[in-house]
Image: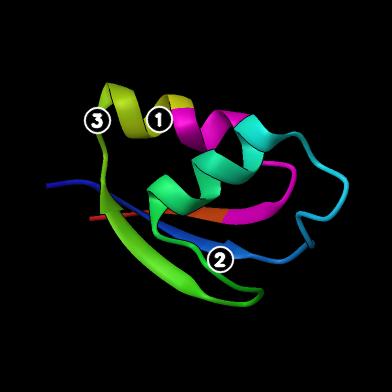
Amino acid sequence: MAKYKITQIISSNGETKRQKDNLRCLGIRRMHQTVEIEKNPVSTGMVAKVAHLCKVEEID
């Protein structure tokens, strides 16, 4: 099953509360933390909202 590998590379300081909440829901709590999540429509939407803060890779 396809997954996303997400690493936060830019600080969330100054971002909206909604974007910070999306990072928390994705499981990212600090800079340079990497998480792997299943690819589905919900996670794809959350990743799209914070893509400017993260490095996103699609893995199998």
Q: Residues within 10 Å of mark 2 (few under 14, many from 20)?
A: many
To which residue does mark 1 refer? 44
Decide if residue 36 is on the left or right side of residue 49.
left
Alpha carbon distance from label 1 to label 3: 6 Å
Neighbor class of circle 3 (other Cα within 10 Å; few <14, some 14-19, many 20+) is: few
User: Do residues under tags 1 and 3 come within 8 Å of each other at their CB atoms?
Assistant: yes
Q: Which residues are magenta?
A: 46-55
The kind of residue on which mark 2 rests is Thr
Question: Can residue 50 be seen by looking at this rendering?
Answer: no
* Nearer-the-camera pick, 38 or 19: 19
Question: Which residue in the structure is indicated by mark 2?
Answer: 7
SS under mark 2: strand
Residue at screen point 56% across, 66% down: 7
Residue 25 versus residue 41 in the image, above or below: below
**Up-down relation of residue 56 to residue 8 (above or below):** above
Relative to 20, 52 lies left or right: right
Where is residue 6 drawn, in percent x and y? Answer: 49, 59
- Give the image location of residue 4, x and y in percent: 36, 51
Left or right relative to 32: residue 57 = left
Q: Residue furthest left?
A: 1
> Could you give the CA–CA distance between mark 1 and mark 2, rounded to whole angstroms?
15 Å
Say which of 50 and 58 sits in front.
Answer: 50
Q: How many marks?
A: 3
Amino acid carrying label 1: it is Thr
- Indicate the amino acid at tag 3: Asn
Please, what secondary structure does the residue beneath circle 1 have?
Answer: helix
Tag of residue 40 = 3
Instruction: Identify the residue at image location x=26%, y=39%.
Output: 39
Sequence-first disc among 3 and 2: 2
Image position, residue 57 (x, y; %): 48, 55
CB within 8 Å, label 3 to label 2: no
The C terminus - image quarter: bottom left
